[in-house]
Image (spheres, helix red, strand yellow):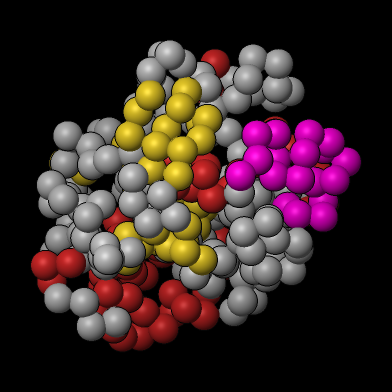
Amino acid sequence: MVVIPVGEFTMGSPVGERGRSEAETPHRVRIPRVYAIATLEVTNKQFNRFLAAVPAYATQWKTATAARFGDPPRFAEYSRTPDSPQVAVSWYDAARYCNWLSERAGFPRSQWVYPEAIDPQNGIELPPDYLHRTGFRLPTEAEWEYSARAGTTTSWHFGDAVTDLPRYAWYDGNTKRERAYPVGQLLPNPWGLFDMLGNVWEWTLDRRQPYPDKALMTEDVEDGMLRVSNDVARTRRGGSFAYEWFTTRSAHRGDTTYFPNQTRDGVGFRVAKTMPQR
C-alpha cells in the first residue's frame, strides 16, 4: 500500500475536457486524514484465499454467483488467471473482504469499518466514525480520484493525449473488450499505483451524490446517511477492459445506477485504510 498525506485538490473536470459529463462539476475537496491505498486491485488468488478462510460466506457468495453467472460462472472468461483482478463482487462482498483483512491484521472490532454481520439483502449501517477507524475499507470517491490524479490536473495523470493511454490502461482500445489482464502489467501512476485506469471498475465507499457548486470548499468526511441499502446507488471508478477511453479519465464517475448488491463481470475493487493519528 502507498501512504497518502492530508491533501487538497480540484475534484471533477474542467468544462473543456474531452469526454467529460455534466456530473463532473469541478470543486475543491480537502482530505483531512492520512490514508493508505493498495497499489494493485484485489486478485482472484487473494479473493479465493478469503473464501477458503470464511466458508460460510463462500457458500453464500458461490450460490449467488451461480444464480447470476451460471455454473461454472461465465465471468471466468473475463478474468482468467490467479493474478487477474477479482470480478463479480458486490459492494457488500468487498466490505466483507475488508473485514477479513482487518481480522487477519489483528484490528479490534472497534476499528472495523463495516459491521461484523453483512446482509446483502437488507443492507448495513456504517458506524458514524467510519473514516476515523483504521481497519481496511474501500477508498472514498475523493480518495480514489486524488490517488488516481497523483497531483495532476489533466485528463489522466500522464496528460491529455489519449494516444498514451495504452501504456497505462486496459480498455476497449487495446483489449477488444475480451478480458481483464493480470494486475500490474502496465505502467503505474507517479504515486506507484497500477491499474487505476481501466482493467476493471473499482467499487468505492460512498453513495452516489451530486457534486456541490464549484464555489464551495468541501471536506471528505463521513456521510450523514449511514445506511447502505439496495435502493441507493454507490460509486465505482476507473473504467474497465470493456469500456471506452473516456471512462478511464481521472474525473469520470460512471452511471448513477450502481447499487451495492449488484455484480458485474467487469467490476472489482482495491482496498484502502485510514492511518492512525500520531
Left or right for 60, reference 42: left
- Is 164 rendered above or below residue 207? below
Which residue does the image show at 33% across and 51% down from the upper left? 33
Question: Is 155 within the magenta?
Answer: yes
- Is 139 rendered above or below residue 184? above
Is residue 86 in sight in this rendering?
no
Q: Quadrant of residue 158?
A: top right
Q: Position of residue 208 (x, y in %)?
A: 36, 32
Q: Position of residue 87 (x, y in %)?
A: 51, 61
Q: Nearer the viewer, residue 78 or 35?
A: 35
Q: Nearer the viewer, residue 230 or 154?
A: 154
- Is 235 rendered above or below residue 175? above
Which residue does the image show at 54% across and 16% down from the upper left? 22
Q: Position of residue 273 (x, y in %)?
A: 35, 62
Q: Quadrant of residue 183?
A: bottom right
Residue range in magenta is: 151-169
Q: Nearer the viewer, residue 58 or 126?
A: 126
Question: Is 82 within the magenta?
Answer: no
Is residue 109 in sight in this rendering?
yes
Which residue does the image show at 61% across and 76% down from the upper left? 83
Q: Main secondary structure of the magenta part?
A: loop
**Which residue is farthest right?**
163
